[in-house]
Image (cartoon, rainbow, N blue to C red):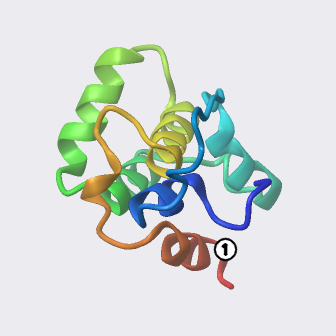
Amino acid sequence: MVGRRQPAVAVAAEHGGEVDLLIGANLDEGSLYLAPLGLLAASTDADVHDVAARFHTEPDAVVRDYRQRHPSAGAAELRVLILGDGLFGSRWGIETHRRSVEDWLVDMLGR
């Protein structure tokens, strides 16, 4: 992260209006929050559901959708995709966050 706040948090708080255009690619960016902590390789279906529940009010539907769009993806890849979309925005939108991204990261990292 280069900025002081997660992009999704800043946008949700209506900051960043002075930025004309924000471009980036984050297909695998969710792995940056998991791999360094040793949380990626051992990902399970329960982990996939848990990360979907952190960002969406209908986690079962989210997991189903990701599995349909990525039929060969295992639990680790699905977890990375859902986490990346949850942190940085996706077609599901950030308005369904149950808790702030910052709270979730503190929870996940234990800090």
Quarter of the image where one finds residue 106:
bottom right
In this rendering, the answer to whether 41 lies above or below 68 is below
Q: Picture coordinates of residue 4 (x, y %)?
A: 72, 67
Query: How many callouts does the rendering have?
Result: 1
Of residues 82 and 49, the one nearer the viewer is 82
Q: Secondary structure at mark 1?
A: helix
Residue 11, above or below 60: below
Q: Vertically, is 54 above or below 100?
A: above
- Where does the C terminus fall, quadrant-wise? bottom right
**Residue 69 in view of the camera:** yes
**Quarter where residue 21 is shown:** top right
Q: Relative to residue 51, is residue 7 drawn left or right?
A: right
Q: Which residue is label 1 attached to?
A: 109
Few, some or many C-alpha atoms within 10 Å of disc 1 (few <14, some 14-19, many ≥20)? Answer: few
Question: Is 52 or 22 nearer to us in this picture?
Answer: 22
Residue at image location 67% in from the left, 39% down from the top? 29
Residue at 48% across, 34% down:
78
Q: Is residue 60 left or right of residue 36?
A: left
Q: Residue at x 41, y 45 (%)?
A: 45
69 versus 99 height, above or below: above
Q: Residue 47, how many percent across, how many down?
A: 46, 54
Amino acid type at mark 1: Leu
Report x, y in % for residue 7.
57, 53
